[in-house]
Image (tube, rainbow, N blue to C red):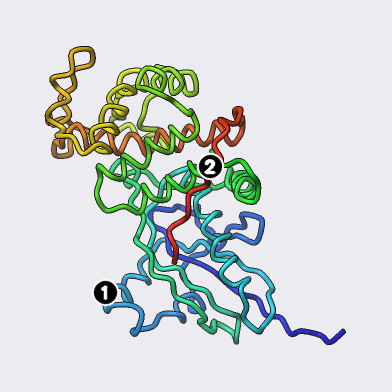
Amino acid sequence: MEYEPHSYVWTFTGLYNVDMGGHDQVELGAGFFLSKPTPSLLSVRSRVDLSGRQFDEMEAVHCFLIHRESLPLLRGPERYKKIERFQNGLMALQILKPLATFGFIFQGAEQAKDRLNLETTCQRTPMNPGEWARMRPLDSQLISQLPDLIAKVLGIMRGKDVERKNAIFLLQHSLEHHHPLLAGLFAVMGMEALFDSQDREQFRNRLCDCLGPTTLAFPDWKPDSSIPRPTYSVGEIAIHLYTLRSKISHGVDLRQAVNNRKYPIDLLKRVSLVPSLPERQYAVLLSEAALYLLCQVLQRKIWCPGASSGQTTTLNRPRV
């Protein structure tokens, strides 16, 4: 059999708000690792693909998530499959602790010392993890949990558990959408994919059963006593999340939620995330909380998967 030459192919994107504990690289298993910016990674920048601001900003990312694998030198369909695999690994990080991303996904082959031969640049919408998540870094304690979580997420995405796949796809939609209320809609839909809930009471009950009614919607991650943690609990906001989802998905004026006889909710009232930040509409706060709750539910379902709801249609990931 004739030998087919191979090369190591790198697929990667930039991440913000990551504390690697002073390490230049951290191995995550399954071909993934974190790396500080290096000349090799920055060598893929192109002023054709990137604006001047993006070109300069790439040097300022805190680290890169990279997937490295030996592949045939002659490019084929497997290159795109590796981008899909990379996105699955990235979503494992987001399930553990939502992070802001650079947006662009690069793929290149090792060529020489400190240089990659750029093959593909995929322009994606940068992921927005919400204001609370941006205040807390992904630190070494959380990073140590990633190898196991990445392996589990990759296994799910290779398998036939449609509900958990759809929930992960909806988490990606939520992180990539620029409108906070639609991002919240996708996050609640992700929880519904896992719960198969039929109405607001069933959604509340299943969310409370999964996480506990007193669990706080805004995780602590790495507690900082100087930043008070928002006190909104699962039991307190579950009905509100479902109401917001229903109003948005049916195109109903959010102001009408306050007139509901059984569950009156003022979605437009001004509330505080933390005292030091400007107030925002309650609907915006709920949307951010929905993202973090979906992450917590996915963590539970990945380690303790529930019974299948019988759903048979898998959502499509946004194409690159």
**24 above or below 254?**
below
Give the mark nearest the N terminus, 1 or 2: 1
Residue 295 pos. (x, y %): 45, 38
Q: Secondary structure at mark 2?
A: helix
Above-or-below relation of 40 to 174: below
Question: Of the residues shown, which amino acid type is indicated by label 2?
Answer: Gln
Q: State the residue at coordinates (48%, 64%).
A: 64
Closer-to-camera residue (224/42):
42
Query: Which residue is labeled 2 in the image?
Result: 141
**Secondary structure beneath label 1:** helix
Residue contact at pointers 1 and 2, CB within 8 angstroms:
no
Viewed as shown, does residue 103 lie left or right of 168?
left
Mark seen at residue 53 = 1
* Farthest-out residue, right: 1
Instruction: Name the quarter where the C terminus is drawn.
Output: bottom left
Which amino acid type is shown beneath numbered disc 1?
Arg
